[in-house]
Image: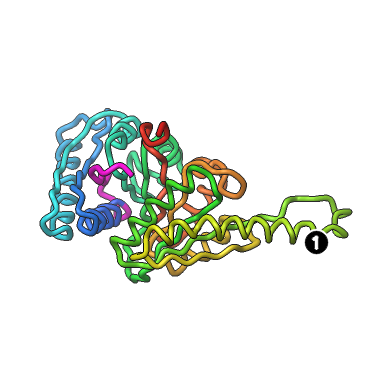
């Protein structure tokens, strides 16, 4: 996995404050530098706007330094379209951390057009933080479907679990196919299919467990919609990790219904992992 700086985008909202706090903690745990950015959009050209932007950035950087100890923290004001600027920032970042809701350019971060555009086109991992994390569970949850995207998500989840000294729980959700009611007599075929998929899912976890003996890795296979399964697991988790592309239950995990649902329903921060171009090519 690419080792770069963590970038936290702030806009002065409570949600973005939670994001910079999460990013500062992550930078400290994983020994990575932190870059705090505020995008002063093109319409914000007046003296008062510039002063507000500078205040937002300074306050966020001070908060990050107070949390992250001796981690290198840099702050920079950026100008331009917020979507374009943040996508560009993600190009050489380990991860881009955003608040789930904000004001100005980040309005409607989870469900709005800005959030979808940034998550859908960022060059790497995007972490969306809903709010201040009050309780620590020592648990990271990863969604798995056997795709290349979920393998990248697993690598990130393992690193997060190791840095947190937390357990990693891998969830495979098998959604019963929509079939004609006349298929009721063939329900045993569906049960057999679930058992076969479950065996494959359990087998995929074994190499991760063998290669990372210092990380406790558990797994479960459920017959459920992936959003419901991950949201339930997230209720007692510190972070949920999904891949940006998938098949089956996690198909189109960035812009599709599953990632949209996980971002909307998960109570904890959500990391959507997209391989950088050089990782996709390897």
**Does the magenta-highlighted stretch encompass residue 150?**
no
Residue 35 found in image quarter: top left
Residue closest to the eye, 212 or 63:
212
Residue closest to the eye, 237 or 79:
237
Q: Which residues are magenta?
A: 1-15
Give the left or right position of residue 169, taking residue 101 as reference: right
Give the left or right position of residue 55, taking residue 122 as reference: left
Q: Secondary structure at mark 1?
A: helix
**Does the magenta-highlighted stretch encompass residue 9?**
yes
The structure residue drawn at horizontal position 15% and vertical position 41%, both measured from the top left corner, is 54
Q: Which residue is mark 1?
A: 188
Q: Position of residue 30 (x, y in %)?
A: 24, 55
Q: Position of residue 91 (x, y in %)?
A: 31, 34
Examine the rendering and report whether any part of residue 10 can be seen: no
Residue 188 found in image quarter: bottom right
Give the left or right position of residue 263, taking residue 46 as reference: right
Which quarter of the image is occupied by the C terminus? top left
Q: Position of residue 114 (x, y in %)?
A: 41, 38
């Amino acid at each position: 996995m690419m080792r770069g700086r963590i970038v936290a985008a702030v806009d002065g909202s409570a949600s973005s404050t939670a994001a910079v706090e999460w990013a500062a903690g992550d930078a400290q745990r994983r020994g990575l530098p932190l870059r705090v950015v505020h995008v002063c959009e093109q319409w914000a050209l007046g003296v008062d706007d510039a002063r507000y932007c500078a205040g937002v950035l300074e306050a966020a950087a001070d908060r990050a330094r107070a949390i992250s100890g001796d981690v290198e923290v840099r702050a920079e004001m950026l100008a331009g379209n917020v979507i374009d600027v943040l996508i560009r920032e993600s190009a050489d970042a380990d991860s881009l951390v955003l608040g789930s809701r904000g004001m100005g350019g980040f309005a409607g971060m989870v469900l709005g057009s800005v959030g979808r555009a940034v998550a859908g086109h960022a060059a790497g991992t995007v972490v969306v933080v809903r709010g201040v994390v009050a309780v620590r569970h020592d648990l990271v949850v990863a969604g798995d479907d056997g795709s290349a995207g979920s393998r990248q998500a697993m690598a990130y989840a393992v690193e997060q679990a190791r840095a947190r000294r937390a357990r990693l729980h891998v969830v495979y959700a098998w959604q019963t196919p929509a079939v004609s009611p006349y298929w009721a007599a063939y329900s045993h075929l569906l049960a057999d299919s679930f058992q076969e998929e479950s065996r494959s899912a359990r087998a995929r976890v074994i190499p991760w467990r063998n290669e990372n003996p210092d990380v406790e890795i558990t797994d479960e296979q459920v017959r459920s919609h992936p959003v419901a399964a991950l949201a339930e697991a997230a209720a007692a988790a510190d972070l949920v990790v999904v891949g940006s592309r998938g098949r089956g239950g996690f198909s189109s995990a960035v812009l599709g219904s599953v990632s949209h649902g996980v971002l909307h329903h998960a109570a904890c921060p959500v990391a959507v992992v997209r391989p950088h171009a050089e990782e996709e090519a390897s």
